[in-house]
């Protein structure tokens, strides 16, 4: 968890993104879909990502930018107050438009389906579908009350991928990643964070 900068406390900004970044910043993070380590560089930011892992959101002013992945440059133009997740597969970056979330009353759960079949986020017993079904390479989100939850990802082929039980806190963003590795589709739930100052 990051500390609240003095200027943010003075302005009363308490949303997820405002806690770490100046107003109207653009936010971007990368998820590593390769089997190797990634080294990211953008502006003054540097970040290392292990295989299958997502980085913290990096922020910058809106406008043109260059993101380097293992020294390979990618050009982007980021709108102010935009939030993006970029999935890197070893050759290209696939962009997912995320929600700029600043509610203090709910938690936001975002699901990214990065496997080659449809997937849904459900309660652990399968009784309620929380998000989905999502086709391959789709994402979607849903605001949820701050509660303790037990969830699973259900795939079109009938497989069920249980997630670790989690306590969702109001004002926070949680990502559900559905990814593939050598043993097949995997799913995990983790809290999203905004990087601290470089």
Image (tube, rainbow, N blue to C red):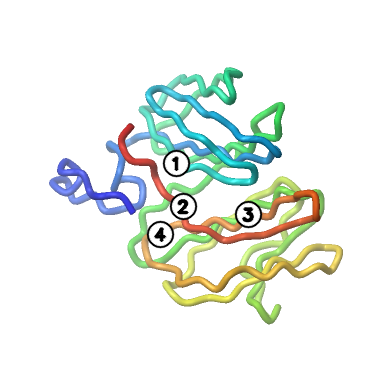
**Secondary structure under badge 4?**
loop
Along the horizontal axis of the image, is 69 left or right of 79? Answer: right
**Above or below — where is 12 with respect to 143?**
above
Question: At which x and y percent is residue 6?
Answer: 15, 43
Dot 2: within a 10 Å radius of its alpha carbon, few (fewer than 14), some, or many (20 or more) residues? many
How far apart in space, not on screen, are marks 4 and 1 (Cα)? 13 Å
Residue topped by disc 2: 192
Residue under the point 70% across and 39% down? 35
Mark closer to the chain start, 4 or 1: 1
Residue drawn at (57%, 19%) of the image: 71
Say whether marks 1 and 3 touch (CB < 8 Å): no
| Pointer 4 residue | 172
Which badge, 1 or 3, comes first in the chain's sequence?
A: 1
Residue position for label 1: 57
Give the crowd class for mark 3: few <14, some 14-19, many >=20 residues within 10 Å.
many
- Quick check: 35 left or right of 39? right
Residue 149, percent from left and from top:
53, 75
- Residue, far left: 10
Q: Position of residue 193 (x, y in %)?
A: 42, 49
CB of mark 2 within 8 Å of CB of mark 1? yes
The CA distance from mark 3 to mark 2 is: 11 Å
Q: Considering only order in the chain, which callout, 1 or 2, is on the residue closer to the N terminus?
A: 1
Horizontal side of residue 181 vs 80, given as left or right? right
When the figure is inspected, residue 30 is found, relative to residue 168, above or below; the finding is above
Q: Is there a contact, CB below 8 Å, between mark 4 and mark 2?
A: yes
Q: Residue at x 38, y 41 (%)?
A: 195
Q: Is 74 or 128 nearer to us in this picture?
A: 74
User: Which of the labelled discs sits on residue 177, or is there none?
Assistant: 3
């Amino acid at each position: 968890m990051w500390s609240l900068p003095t200027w943010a406390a003075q302005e009363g900004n308490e949303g997820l993104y405002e806690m770490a970044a100046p107003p109207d910043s653009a936010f971007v993070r990368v998820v590593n879909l390769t089997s190797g380590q990634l080294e990211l560089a953008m502006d003054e930011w540097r970040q290392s990502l292990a295989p299958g892992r997502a980085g913290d959101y990096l922020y910058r002013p809106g406008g043109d930018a260059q993101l380097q992945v293992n020294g390979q440059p990618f050009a982007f133009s980021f709108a102010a107050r935009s939030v993006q997740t970029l999935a890197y597969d070893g050759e290209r970056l696939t962009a997912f438009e995320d929600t700029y979330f600043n509610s203090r009353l709910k938690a936001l759960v975002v699901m990214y389906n990065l496997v080659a079949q449809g997937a849904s986020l459900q309660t652990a017993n399968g009784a309620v579908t929380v998000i989905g079904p999502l086709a391959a390479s789709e994402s979607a989100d849903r605001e949820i009350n701050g509660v303790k939850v037990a969830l699973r990802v259900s795939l079109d082929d009938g497989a069920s991928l249980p997630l670790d039980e989690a306590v969702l806190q109001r004002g926070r963003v949680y990502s559900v990643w559905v990814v593939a590795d050598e043993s097949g589709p995997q799913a995990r739930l983790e809290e999203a964070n905004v990087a601290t100052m470089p």
